Structures are given as structure tokens and as C-alpha cells.
Image: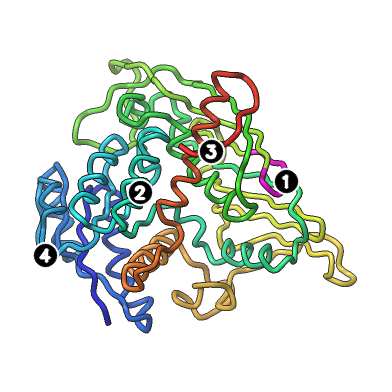
């Protein structure tokens, strides 16, 4: 068993999820020869750092994120801080020679994401990025069906991520709504998942034509140190301007000739967490929605007398499912996906070989996001080119 020393920066919701996920790797993947040692965690709120240490079993905690990077026993740095801190922390970890896990979007802008990618590549370090939806057992199964040619040639792809955490006009003006701190809005927060999934399943995107809109232009100012980006204010509270987009969409063309659409919205009313996709080919089609992540609709041309979609339930015959539940129809959950993700990151370090989804995949979606933003300015189709 090889144990990797891990330090986590940012102990809010996502950092806590990462901490639990690293702890679970040694259990869920007990026969794969890798586990994590939780060395140190950091948060600028001391109470939150200390609580994370006590709850998750870190050996130490700190309010100085650089102490995580400088710790001699930390081999891998996990950045789970707000977006505007990603670049500085990621580059510092790379400069210190530490392997890097960074939550999406990595940088506030596609250019910052590309900068971190190039720095890690030049340093020869291993990396990972938090696009966990691709690890759902039925998504992995869908990928295998496509690779095996079961759907034939892919002709159409529709991907979307609809969430309503910001549909309430009283949702607090957190950093996610400020261009200076988060860069883009829905494009940077949600589109990395959609663009990554599209390229994972349907192949590289070569052209885009995008559009964007800010539907709620002012929000209540937050109370420092209280709540999350899901928190709401009260009518009459002081407000501030929303400076990035609530919605982003794009028509896309894939390298293989397929056409499709990608859409993200944080203010849409109805869907709670609809990270969803539809893939259509010449021999079959499939549909998947994270809100029913343990189900998939599948239609194959060789299904005999049956003509139409059938419901597939996740089970131990699908990738990774058996690591969590032994029976069909016994579902896995969101944090299980993060455990699968953490395992692959640690295993890549042990093997000394880049896995997916690394900063290579982050760079790929960053190029798509950059072309989308250029399309906002030009009003037309833009080629996806390397940053």
C-alpha cells in the first residue's frame, strides 16, 4: 500500500467533501494499493479549519494556505478555495513541486486555466481537476458504449447544467456573482462540467457560437462569514450589482462532424441540479440526468423486437458501482463520485502517469470557453484554438 500525503486548501463545503473522499479511498479501493494521509488543511476562518481537522482527521490545521504547500509531508495539494484564489495557489503548489488537484474552473478566466496547465506540464507534475460527473457509473458505461461503437457514428449531442440556486432574486451577492472575483458567472461555474462531458463522450469541439445573459442584475449584499452561495438575504437589504452572466449557451460543432448544443443557467426555475446529456448516433441513443444519476435511458438498434428507449438502472456490472453497493438498483451518491475522482488522482501519482480528468482536460474545456466568449463579442461562429 502506497500512502500519499495530502493537504487541502479551503475547508468550506467542497473542501470538506474532498477530505471525506480521500479518507474513503483506502476503504472503497482497498485492493488497489493506494491510500491518503490527511496531513494538513487550511482555511482563512480558523474555527472552520479546526473543525475540519477534528471531523476529518487531518494531523494539523492552519489559516495560512502557504503552510499547506510548504509542509514537507504534503506530496499532493488539493485546492478547493473560491475561484479567484485558484491561480495563485495552484501556481505556488506547482512551483513547490507538489502534485495538484484543483477544483474547476481552475482559473477565473480560460487564460488563467491555460496558464496553470502549461506550468504543471512544464514542471512534469501530475494533476487532476474536479469534473466529478464524468465518474458516475452510468456515464462511464455510456462512454464505453460509444467507444465500442454501439451508438454508431455520433450525429447530435445536447448537454446542459440547469440549477436554480440563484433563481431567487434575494440570493446573496456572493463572490460567484462578481466578475472581479470569479471571472465569468455561469460559464465558468457550470460550463466546465458540460463542456468536459461533451468532449468526454462525443469528442473534441472545434467551433462554437455562443450567447449569454444576466437575468437578475442586483442582489442583497452578504454578511461576511455567514452562509454559502445558497444563502438568501431579506427584502430591503442593501444590494450590489451582479457583474457576470446568469446564463450561457452555445451551438457547437465536433471534430467528428456531430452538431450539438451546450447550455448552463443558475437562475432557471424548476431544475435543482440538472446536469444532463443526450447523445444520438446512427445506431442508438442515450439520455442521462444527474438528478436521476442511477438511471439512464438507452435505445439501441439491435434490441430485437423492442423499439424505443429502455430504462437502465446502475448496478455492479457498471464501472465503479460495486465499490459502493453490491446490488443492482442500489444507487451511489454525489460524494461517491468524488471518492472515485480522489482515487484516480492518487493512483496517477503512484503510477507516475497522467490520468483523466487532469489539467489536460481542464485546458480542453478552457479553450471551448474562450471561443464561446469570443463569440459573445463577434456575434458569430468562432474556432476553438489553443490558448
Give the total of numbered labels. Answer: 4
Q: CA distance from mark 1 to mark 4?
A: 50 Å
Q: Nearer the viewer, mark 2 or mark 4?
A: 2
Q: Residue at x 60, y 28 (%)?
A: 210
The quadrant of the image that shows the N terminus is bottom left
Q: CA distance from mark 1 to mark 2?
A: 29 Å
Q: Nearer the viewer, mark 1 or mark 2?
A: 1
Dot label at residue 258? 1
Q: Position of residue 55 (x, y in %)?
A: 18, 62
Circles 1 and 2: CB atoms closer than 8 Å: no
Q: Position of residue 322 (x, y in %)?
A: 49, 78
Q: What element does badge 4 sit on?
A: loop
Q: CA distance from mark 2 to mark 4?
A: 23 Å
Residue beneath disc 2: 103
The residue stretch that appears in magenta: 254-261
Residue beneath disc 4: 59
Whether residue 205 is situated above or below residue 151 in the rendered picture = above
Q: CA distance from mark 3 to mark 4?
A: 40 Å
Q: Residue at x 29, y 41 (%)?
A: 86
Residue beneath disc 3: 368
Q: What element does badge 1 sit on?
A: loop
Q: Residue at x 38, y 77 (%)?
A: 29
Of callouts 1 and 4, which one flags the residue occurring earlier in the amino acid sequence? Answer: 4
Amino acid at each position: 500500500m502506497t500512502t500519499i500525503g495530502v493537504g487541502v486548501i479551503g475547508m468550506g463545503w467542497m473542501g470538506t467533501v474532498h477530505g471525506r473522499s480521500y479518507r474513503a479511498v483506502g476503504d472503497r479501493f482497498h485492493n488497489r494499493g493506494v491510500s491518503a494521509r490527511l496531513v494538513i488543511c487550511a482555511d482563512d476562518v480558523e474555527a472552520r479549519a479546526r473543525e475540519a481537522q477534528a471531523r476529518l482527521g487531518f494531523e494539523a490545521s492552519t489559516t495560512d494556505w502557504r503552510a499547506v504547500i510548504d509542509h514537507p509531508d504534503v506530496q499532493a495539494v488539493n485546492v478547493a478555495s473560491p475561484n479567484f484564489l485558484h491561480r495563485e495557489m495552484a501556481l505556488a503548489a506547482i512551483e513547490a513541486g507538489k502534485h495538484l488537484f484543483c477544483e474547476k474552473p481552475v482559473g477565473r478566466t480560460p487564460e488563467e486555466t491555460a496558464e496553470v496547465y502549461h506550468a504543471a506540464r512544464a514542471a512534469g507534475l501530475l494533476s487532476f481537476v474536479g469534473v466529478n460527473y464524468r465518474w458516475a457509473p452510468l456515464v462511464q458505461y455510456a462512454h464505453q458504449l460509444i467507444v465500442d461503437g454501439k451508438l454508431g457514428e455520433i450525429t447530435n449531442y445536447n448537454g446542459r447544467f440547469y440549477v436554480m440556486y440563484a433563481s431567487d432574486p434575494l440570493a446573496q451577492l456572493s463572490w460567484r456573482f462578481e466578475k472581479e472575483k470569479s471571472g465569468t458567472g455561469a460559464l465558468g461555474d457550470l460550463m466546465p462540467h458540460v463542456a468536459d462531458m461533451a468532449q468526454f463522450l462525443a469528442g473534441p469541439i472545434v467551433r462554437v457560437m455562443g450567447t449569454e445573459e444576466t437575468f437578475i442584475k442586483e442582489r442583497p449584499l452578504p454578511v461576511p462569514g455567514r452562509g454559502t452561495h445558497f444563502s438568501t438575504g431579506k427584502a430591503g437589504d442593501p444590494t450590489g450589482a451582479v457583474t457576470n452572466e446568469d446564463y450561457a449557451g452555445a451551438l457547437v460543432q465536433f471534430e467528428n462532424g456531430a452538431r450539438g448544443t451546450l447550455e448552463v443557467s443558475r437562475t432557471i426555475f424548476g431544475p435543482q441540479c440538472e446536469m444532463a446529456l443526450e447523445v444520438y448516433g446512427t445506431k442508438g441513443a442515450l439520455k442521462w440526468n444527474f438528478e436521476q444519476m442511477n438511471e439512464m435511458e438507452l435505445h439501441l438498434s439491435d434490441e430485437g423486437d423492442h423499439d424505443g428507449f429502455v430504462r437502465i438502472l446502475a448496478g455492479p456490472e457498471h464501472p465503479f458501482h460495486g465499490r459502493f453497493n453490491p446490488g443492482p438498483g442500489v444507487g451511489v451518491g454525489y460524494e461517491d463520485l468524488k471518492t472515485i475522482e480522489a482515487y484516480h488522482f492518487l493512483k496517477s501519482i503512484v503510477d507516475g502517469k497522467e490520468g483523466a480528468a487532469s489539467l489536460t482536460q481542464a485546458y480542453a474545456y478552457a479553450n471551448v470557453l474562450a471561443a464561446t466568449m469570443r463569440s459573445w463579442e463577434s456575434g458569430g461562429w468562432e474556432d476553438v484554438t489553443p490558448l
